[in-house]
């Protein structure tokens, strides 16, 4: 299977690329910048079935280049996180967050999906987050982007069922994993705000403690789910991990008021 993975310079997507390559798939591992491409190429030089490419999903010319690869599976992973209170959010950053996490991801999905539907064959795996299910104080913008992409995919799944196509679109909803993303997200949540300045330091310390306590250090449990989403003959509509966060998400959806 030919698989393209966006935003795979590090973390979950990078480990997924290595795992899928070890399982015999041909992997197009894409990075946002040329410097990342250079670094990752060096790290994966022993993998003959991994090709590292620069793909900026916010650029239409890069998105259309993906079509030339004629992949069997697209794993849409690229995303950024914006923190901060809703009342103080910088609208330019809000737009940037939605541009990357929703609009650009949606557009790439749309282009590849049309190609797959025409062939009546293919699979798209979309990285969302438990944050799209459970609202996070001072993380509302990021949660909103993930909730948006989740609803887009869930609606699309119903449309594809009505079409009777063999093409599948699958959601991944991970909890907290130690990739560095959460630390960057937390570090920019409370900067330069005046409305919560009196409790900023307390919130910062509490959240860092809770994240450190709750993060899964090993990425294996989520990578296993991603591999299943790619390979299962009858994939689930949603894969969640780790188990504790999957249960938390289900309980919240049942008991929220």
Image (cartoon, rainbow, N blue to C red):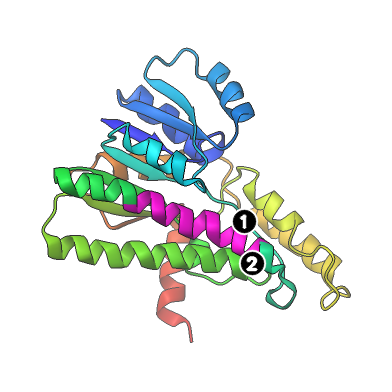
**Is 62 rendered above or below residue 234?**
above
Instruction: State whether the magenta stretch is mostly helix, strand or loop.
Output: helix
Question: Is residue 147 part of the magenta span, yes or no?
Answer: no
Q: CA distance from mark 2 to mark 1?
A: 8 Å
Answer few, some or many: residues within 10 Å of disc 1's Cα (few below 14, many 20 plus, some between 14 and 19): many
- Residue projecting furthest to the right: 198
Residue 234 in view in this figure: no
Tell me which residue sits at (60%, 63%) in the image: 95
At numbered mark 1, what does the secondary structure look like: helix, strand or loop?
loop
Circles 2, 1 touching at the beta carbon (< 8 Å):
yes
Q: Earlier in the sequence, mark 2 or mark 1?
A: 1
| In the image, residue 92 above or below residue 10 | below
Badge 2 element: loop
Is residue 231 toward the left or the right of residue 218 in the image?
left
Give the residue number, with chain letter if any, for mark 1: 81
Displayed quadrant of residue 232? top left
Determine which residue is flagged by label 2: 139
Where 200 falls versus 39 (above or below)?
below
Check disc 2: other Cα within 10 Å, few if <14, some if 14-19, many if 20+.
some
Task: Give the image location of residue 72, x and y in percent.
Answer: 26, 37
Total numbered badges shown on the rendered structure:
2
Seen from this angle, which residue lies furthest bottom?
257
Q: Quadrant of residue 2?
A: top left
Residue 89 at x, y percent in the picture: 71, 70
Q: Position of residue 122 (x, y in %)?
A: 22, 43
Location of residue 98 by image quarter: bottom right
The stretch in magenta equals 93-110
| Farthest left residue in view | 164
Left or right relative to 33: residue 206: right
* Viewer can see residue 57: yes
Relative image position of residue 1 (x, y in whole percent):
25, 30
Q: Residue at x 48, y 39 (%)?
A: 13
């Amino acid at each position: 299977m030919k698989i393209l993975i966006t935003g795979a310079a590090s973390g979950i997507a990078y480990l997924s690329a290595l795992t899928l390559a070890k399982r015999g798939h041909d992997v197009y591992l894409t990075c946002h910048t040329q410097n990342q491409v250079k670094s990752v190429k060096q790290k994966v030089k022993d993998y003959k079935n991994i090709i590292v490419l620069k793909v900026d999903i916010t650029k239409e010319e890069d998105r259309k280049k993906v079509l030339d690869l004629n992949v069997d599976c697209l794993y849409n992973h690229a995303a950024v996180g914006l923190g901060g209170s809703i009342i103080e959010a910088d609208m330019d950053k809000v737009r940037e967050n939605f541009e990357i996490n929703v609009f650009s991801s949606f557009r790439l999905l749309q282009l590849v999906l049309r190609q797959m539907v025409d062939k009546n064959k293919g699979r798209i795996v979309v990285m969302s987050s438990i944050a799209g299910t459970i609202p996070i104080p001072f993380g509302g913008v990021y949660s909103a982007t993930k909730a948006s992409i989740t609803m887009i995919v869930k609606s699309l799944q119903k449309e594809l069922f009505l079409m009777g196509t063999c093409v599948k679109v699958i959601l991944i909803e991970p909890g907290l994993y130690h990739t560095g993303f959460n630390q960057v997200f937390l570090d920019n949540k409370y900067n330069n705000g005046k409305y919560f300045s009196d409790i900023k330091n307390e919130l910062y310390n509490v959240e860092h403690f809770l994240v450190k306590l709750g993060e899964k250090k090993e990425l294996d449990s989520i990578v296993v789910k991603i591999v299943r989403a790619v390979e299962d003959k009858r994939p689930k509509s949603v894969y969640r991990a780790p188990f504790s966060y999957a249960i938390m998400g289900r309980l919240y959806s049942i008991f929220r008021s």
